[in-house]
């Protein structure tokens, strides 16, 4: 009877430990996904700014833009 109690208690502790590890893993995955969304948004903004900069530079360097 005592062995059964210790086995159940050990399984309970193991499940708590694994549940905590799984929660940590899921939190890291969620954090990474939010970081990827943030970086893709920043990258989109920078590429849009770079495209606009290139367009205005080409307009100012072209002879038609100076008239």
Image (tube, rainbow, N blue to C red):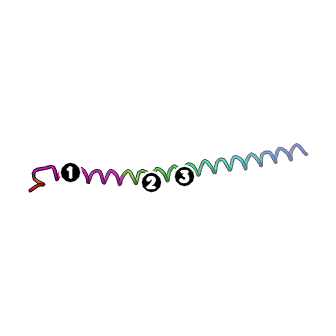
Q: Which mark is residue 30?
A: 3
Q: Residue at point 13% right, 50% down?
A: 62
Mark 1 crowd level (few <14, some 14–19, many ≥20, 10 Å Cα): few
Give the spatial CA distance, label 1 vs label 2. 28 Å
Which circle marks residue 11 in the picture? none
Disc 3 versus disc 2: distance between alpha carbons? 12 Å
Residue 40 in the image: x percent, y percent?
41, 51
Q: Tell me the quarter of the picture where residue 2 sits.
A: top right
Q: Looking at this view, name the residue that lies furthest to the bottom.
A: 67
Residue 45: percent from left, percent from top: 35, 54
The quadrant of the rendering that contains the N terminus is top right
Closer to the eye: label 3 or 2: 2
In the picture as drawn, the residue positioned furthest to the left comes out as: 67
Residue occupying the point 40% across, 54% down: 41
Left or right: where does residue 11 sit relative to residue 42?
right
Residue in view at x 59 percent, y 52 percent: 27
The answer to whether the residues at label 3 and label 1 have Cβ atoms under 8 Å apart is: no
Disc 3/disc 1 C-alpha distance (Å): 40 Å
Q: Which residues are magenta?
A: 44-63
The answer to whether marks 3 and 2 mark residues whose Cβ atoms lie closer than 8 Å is: no
Q: Position of residue 54 (x, y in %)?
A: 24, 50
Label 2 Cα crowd, 10 Å radius (few <14 / some 14-19 / many 20+): few
Nearer the viewer's eye, disc 3 or disc 1?
Answer: 1
Query: Which labelled disc corresponds to residue 38?
Result: 2
Sequence-wise first label, 3 or 2: 3
Residue bearing mark 1: 57
Tag 1's secondary structure? Answer: helix
């Amino acid at each position: 009877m005592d062995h059964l109690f210790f086995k159940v208690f050990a399984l309970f502790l193991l499940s708590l430990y694994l549940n905590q590890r799984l929660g940590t893993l899921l939190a890291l995955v969620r954090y990474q996904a939010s970081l990827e969304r943030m970086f893709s948004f920043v990258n989109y903004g920078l590429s849009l700014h770079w495209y606009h900069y290139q367009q205005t530079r080409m307009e100012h360097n072209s002879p038609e833009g100076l008239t």
